Image: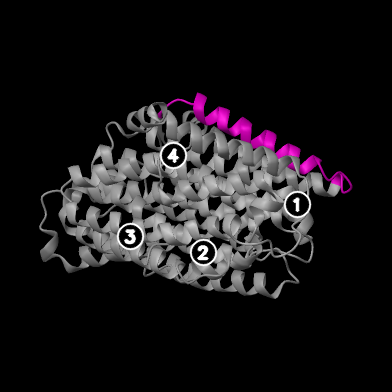
């Protein structure tokens, strides 16, 4: 059984980053009322708070608190860093995106902070109840962020679809938790693992049903097929900065939960759920890559691209080894840079009244803005997995981990589908470099987006040319887990 719940100073110290973010979120709400005319105050406070939280995460000590419900270890720290890095990019992209979209900024930054708080709780969740609480805090905040453009019908539709389908997925997840609790007598993941060790899962349909429902709920949150239907509509309808945020930070937090639940809680019956995960990974890669071929909107194309990359990242969880987990962590960190870079280009091209989200808007970009076209080319190459970009390193580590775990057939299919993805990524490159300009493309200057593009470029090139430091950090974070 799990330890009794304990609320003490040591536990609060472990949760210092989360506590700080809650205080920051409340401060941002108050600052909007106290200083309504200071447009740069909230972004500055948010960025300072995120960087401070990043320092608290890196400087914090490992341990287990709140009666075994909250755990800070290498896995939690790494995923928290990915979430915070994604948030830093989002804050940098938000100033220009809010100007183009005409969004109010008061509630924007506080909702962003509360969403990140939920993600950090998810990364440290060692209990299924904490998983659910963190996931709901994250989800409720993002529902509001998606629908923040109240007078935009597309944003309203996206928020409503996401809310309805997200609520259904949360209910399915909660039902799965209830079944696991009924069979194991606990919601603590370590205790669940001890309870099911040595049991014949194939002869316990309720246990299989509980695992299946948990997988359904978590696969919805990461955007895996066949639970991906919300992704393209929500990505297209949400403000572009929030779309970029959703593609990185919540995805990383959801993968942290998926890794903890499946590897810390159900590793003793890995051979049972691995079949399901293998099928989901293959279906996800197929759906994402194939449907992306027919997209004419850059945001919808990147949405289906995101689905395909979820399939690749699932290969590390499928392996069920330290190497596989480290490969997934490494991949998600790299994905943050290359995907945020691509969305930064989309945001920089947009103007008031002209979102420029069609692929046709990228025709001849190399002639009108060669630097921006070169950056987009770099990010497209990395998303494809072409060396020496970081995307190649990420995919290679995942494929090798799956091969070493014995899933050679799945890896062969992943390689073939990755080749398919080259068509729609390189189609953007062809439009930019081989087509005549479709009209003037005046690009507004933005310091935040410029910094984001610079960071993304350094990450994609640096982690591709010299990946050893990141690979080592991911490997160390995965030691002893599962």
Circle 3 residue: 417
Structural distance between the alpha carbons of marks 1 and 2: 22 Å
Quarter of the view holding residue 185: bottom left
Name the side, left or right, on which 255 lies relative to 339.
left
Of mark 4 and mark 1, the one earlier in the sequence is 4
Circle 1 residue: 443
Name the residue rendered at 66%, 43% in the picture.
Answer: 371
Structural distance between the alpha carbons of marks 4 and 2: 20 Å
Location of residue 290 in the rendering, given as x and y in whole percent from the top left corner: 39, 68
Residue placed most toward the observer, 132 or 9:
132
Q: Say above or below: 340 vs 212.
A: above
**Res 390 label:** 4
Tell me, yes or no, whether the two marked residues, 2 and 3, touch with CB atoms within 8 Å. Answer: no
Instruction: Give the overall secondary structure of the magenta segment.
Output: helix
| Residue 351 within the segment the image draws in magenta | no
**Start and end of the magenta stretch?**
34-62
Tell me, yes or no, whether the two marked residues, 4 and 1, touch with CB atoms within 8 Å. Answer: no
Name the residue rendered at 74%, 42% in the picture.
Answer: 43
Label 4 sits on a secondary structure element that is helix
Structural distance between the alpha carbons of marks 4 and 3: 19 Å
């Amino acid at each position: 059984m799990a330890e009794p719940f304990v609320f003490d100073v040591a536990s609060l110290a472990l949760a210092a980053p989360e506590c700080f973010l809650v205080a920051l979120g409340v401060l941002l709400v108050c600052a909007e009322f106290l200083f309504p005319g200071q447009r740069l105050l909230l972004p500055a406070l948010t960025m300072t708070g995120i960087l401070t939280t990043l320092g608290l995460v890196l400087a914090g000590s490992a341990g287990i608190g709140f009666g075994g419900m909250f755990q800070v270890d290498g896995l939690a720290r790494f995923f928290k860093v990915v979430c915070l890095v994604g948030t830093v990019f989002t804050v940098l992209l938000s100033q220009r995106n809010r100007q183009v979209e005409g969004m109010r900024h008061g509630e924007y930054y506080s909702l962003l902070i509360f969403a990140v708080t939920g993600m950090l709780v998810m990364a440290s969740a060692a209990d299924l109840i904490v998983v659910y609480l963190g996931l709901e805090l994250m989800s409720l905040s993002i529902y509001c962020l998606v629908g923040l453009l109240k007078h935009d019908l597309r944003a309203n539709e996206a928020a409503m679809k996401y809310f309805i389908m997200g609520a259904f997925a949360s209910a399915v997840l909660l039902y799965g938790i209830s079944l696991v609790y009924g069979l194991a007598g606990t919601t603590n993941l370590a205790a669940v693992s001890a309870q099911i060790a040595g049991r014949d899962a194939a002869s316990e349909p309720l246990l299989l049903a509980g695992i299946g429902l948990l997988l359904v709920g978590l696969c919805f949150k990461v955007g895996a097929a066949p639970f991906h239907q919300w992704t393209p509509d929500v990505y297209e309808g949400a403000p572009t900065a929030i779309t970029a945020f959703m593609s990185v930070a919540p995805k990383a937090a959801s993968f942290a939960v998926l890794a903890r639940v499946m590897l810390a809680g159900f590793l003793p019956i890995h051979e049972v759920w691995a079949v399901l995960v293998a099928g989901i990974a293959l279906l996800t890669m197929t759906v994402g890559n194939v449907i992306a071929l027919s997209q004419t909107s850059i945001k919808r194309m990147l949405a289906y691209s995101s689905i395909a990359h979820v399939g690749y990242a699932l290969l590390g969880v499928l392996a069920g080894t330290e190497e596989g987990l480290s490969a997934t962590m490494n991949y998600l960190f790299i994905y943050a840079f290359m995907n945020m870079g691509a969305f930064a280009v989309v945001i920089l091209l947009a103007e008031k009244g002209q979102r420029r989200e069609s692929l046709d808007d990228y025709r001849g970009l190399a002639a009108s803005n060669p630097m921006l076209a070169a950056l987009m080319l770099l990010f497209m190459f990395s998303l494809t997995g072409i060396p020496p970009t970081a995307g190649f390193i990420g995919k290679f580590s995942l494929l090798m981990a799956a091969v070493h775990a014995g899933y050679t057939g799945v890896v062969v299919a992943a390689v073939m589908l990755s080749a398919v993805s080259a068509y729609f990524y390189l189609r953007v490159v062809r439009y930019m470099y081989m087509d005549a300009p479709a009209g003037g493309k005046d690009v507004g200057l933005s310091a935040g987006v410029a910094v984001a593009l610079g960071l993304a470029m350094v990450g994609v090139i640096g982690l591709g040319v010299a990946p050893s430091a990141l690979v080592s950090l991911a490997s160390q974070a995965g030691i002893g887990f599962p």
